[in-house]
């Protein structure tokens, strides 16, 4: 069967392209931009066209697969439908592929990439040889996707696509639920937004009911309320609460240690090299699934001891002027808060380069950014990365800066470009600092370019 994937260079689509190819299908794709991932796909023999055009939907294409961002009125989509070809969303294809194995799915507003990466790392470390599709680079599986001979298919499930509710799983991890990817009003209609908070909650309830077993975070106190009636066959995990728990927890030095217990009985001692309580929760979830599936927890804990984080999830880039440089995908207040608290656990001076992501999210959450960013010692603010959203009057980074200053936090500065903040870091970085870039946009380039320039590469 010939699949053609639109926006094939994205982290989710590129992984599916490689999995489809490994399953013996013919695969092609197109993307408006050229990424490292599109080059990687071409190196694997997958043809990638630049841009979108109806000519890509050739006679021998059987199915057109759309990323969440592709609109239904795109010419390729309209042409494929008129030609009687199968048209499906990425999440629908992923669900189809998962049904061929025992599906372990990971969903939630926060932590799903890190948790699915940890699950894949644990199963690989326990010689279970899983198939996996993760929204980030995972060292243990050599990228963002892997086809294994084992019986499990581990997948990150993105709740931003309302169709995620229809994914069926043998085990579904739900890390948390927060009001993200919800439309601003009734006129705000997009493929990656739920019409209302209640629609989002209903989608999670259906997702839970479609799983044979649910593993959920008991520390996220609203979860049990939201999922009421959907947890008949469920097991909980957490630090403060839950059947599986992290006890004797220490977060010092950015390398948490804890004892995993089940109903108070010790299972295994665990050490991580990724910081913060949020990563402890992710680790407990992954170990709980390993235990439920009968894997060796000593091997599982050993695999996590070497887990460096998924790509852009507390990705340690290197050192400059003896300052530690880290890049993180944190792009909403809860994620930013967790990342800063993790950074502070190192015991160093923390400088945050923050790029707000999406206009609508910033309009809703800017006051929470003001609150959580003040935990850092210094904040360097960039303009909003709009991701194609229209501007809203008065919604900008200056509003965040001015509010922080009015509350007495003066060590916050605005930079109009990536180059400006890069040059500032090059001039001011010093020993004893941890500098972390945060956001889901192109802020990821800043510290990488600092290192390149320091090495004479720019």
Image (tube, helix red, strand yellow):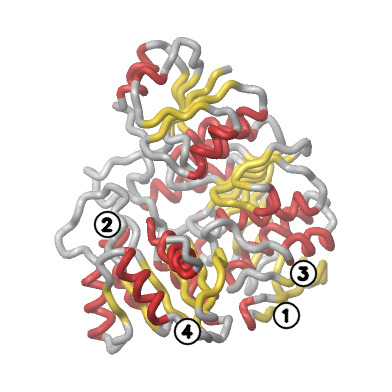
Along the polypeptide, which appears first: circle 2 or circle 1? 1
* Residue 306 point in image, percent of width and height: 72, 64
Give the answer, above or below, for where 174 lies relative to 262: above
Q: Residue at x 35, y 19 (%)?
A: 54
* Residue 47 point in image, percent of width and height: 51, 26
Q: Which mark, by number, is residue 248? A: 1
Q: Mark 2 points at which residue?
A: 359
The residues tagged by marks 4 and 2 sit, at their Cα atoms, a distance apart of: 33 Å
* Residue 111 point in image, percent of width and height: 54, 59
The residues tagged by marks 3 and 1 sit, at their Cα atoms, a distance apart of: 10 Å
Q: For residue 46, what is the image quadrant? A: top right
Quadrant containing the N terminus is top right
Quadrant containing the C terminus is bottom left
Q: Which of marks 4 and 2 is in front?
A: 4
Along the polypeptide, which appears first: circle 4 or circle 1? 1
Question: What is the crowding at mark 4: few (fewer than 14 residues within 10 Å), some, or many (at least 20)?
Answer: some
Give the answer, above or below, for where 24 lies relative to 423: above
The residues tagged by marks 2 and 1 sit, at their Cα atoms, a distance apart of: 41 Å
Give the answer, above or below, for where 145 lies relative to 26: below
Q: Which mark, by number, is residue 430? A: 4
Give the answer, above or below, for where 183 lies relative to 277: above
Left/right placement of residue 403 relative to residue 163 reads: left
Q: Name the residue under label 3.
A: 261
Q: Which of 322 and 393 is in front in this view?
A: 322
Along the polypeptide, which appears first: circle 2 or circle 3? 3
Mark 4 lies on a secondary structure that is loop
Q: Residue at x 49, y 20 (%)?
A: 63
């Amino acid at each position: 069967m010939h699949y053609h994937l639109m926006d094939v260079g994205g982290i989710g689509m590129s992984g599916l392209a490689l999995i489809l190819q490994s399953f013996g299908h013919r695969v092609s794709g197109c993307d408006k931009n050229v990424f490292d991932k599109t080059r990687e796909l071409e190196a694997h023999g997958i043809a990638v066209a630049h841009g979108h055009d109806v000519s890509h939907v050739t006679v021998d294409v059987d199915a057109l697969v759309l990323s969440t961002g592709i609109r239904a009125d795109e010419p390729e989509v309209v042409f494929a439908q008129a030609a009687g070809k199968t048209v499906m969303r990425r999440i629908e294809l992923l669900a189809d592929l998962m049904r061929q194995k025992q599906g372990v799915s990971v969903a939630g507003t926060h932590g799903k990439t890190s948790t699915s990466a940890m699950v894949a790392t644990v199963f690989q470390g326990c010689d279970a040889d899983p198939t996996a599709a993760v929204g980030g680079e995972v060292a243990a599986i050599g990228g963002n996707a892997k086809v294994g001979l084992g019986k499990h298919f581990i997948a990150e499930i993105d709740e931003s696509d309302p169709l995620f509710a229809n994914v069926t799983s043998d085990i579904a991890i739900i890390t948390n639920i927060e009001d993200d990817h919800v439309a601003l009003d009734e006129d705000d209609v997009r493929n990656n937004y739920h019409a209302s908070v209640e629609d989002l909650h209903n989608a999670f309830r259906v997702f839970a009911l479609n799983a044979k077993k649910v593993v959920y975070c008991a520390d996220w106190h609203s979860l049990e309320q939201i999922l009421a009636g959907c947890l008949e066959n469920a097991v909980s995990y957490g630090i403060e609460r839950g059947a599986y728990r992290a006890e004797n927890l220490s977060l010092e030095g950015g390398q948490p240690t804890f004892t995993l217990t089940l109903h108070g009985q010790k299972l295994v001692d665990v050490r991580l090299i990724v910081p913060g309580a949020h990563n402890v929760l992710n680790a407990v979830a992954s170990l709980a699934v390993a235990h439920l599936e009968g894997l060796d927890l000593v091997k599982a804990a050993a695999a996590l001891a070497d887990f460096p984080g998924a790509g852009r999830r507390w990705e340690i880039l290197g050192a400059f002027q003896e300052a530690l440089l880290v890049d993180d995908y944190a792009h909403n207040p809860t994620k930013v808060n967790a990342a800063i608290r993790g950074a502070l656990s190192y015991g160093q001076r923390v400088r945050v380069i923050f790029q707000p992501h999406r206009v609508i999210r910033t309009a809703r959450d800017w006051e929470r950014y003001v609150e959580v960013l003040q935990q850092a010692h210094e904040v360097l603010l960039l303009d909003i990365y709009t991701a194609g959203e229209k501007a809203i009057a008065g919604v900008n980074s200056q509003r965040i800066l001015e509010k922080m200053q009015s509350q007495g936090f003066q060590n916050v500065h605005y930079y109009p470009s990536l180059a400006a903040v890069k040059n500032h870091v090059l001039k001011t970085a010093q020993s004893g600092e941890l500098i972390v870039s945060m956001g889901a946009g192109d802020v990821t380039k800043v510290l990488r370019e600092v290192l390149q320039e320091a090495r004479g590469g720019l």
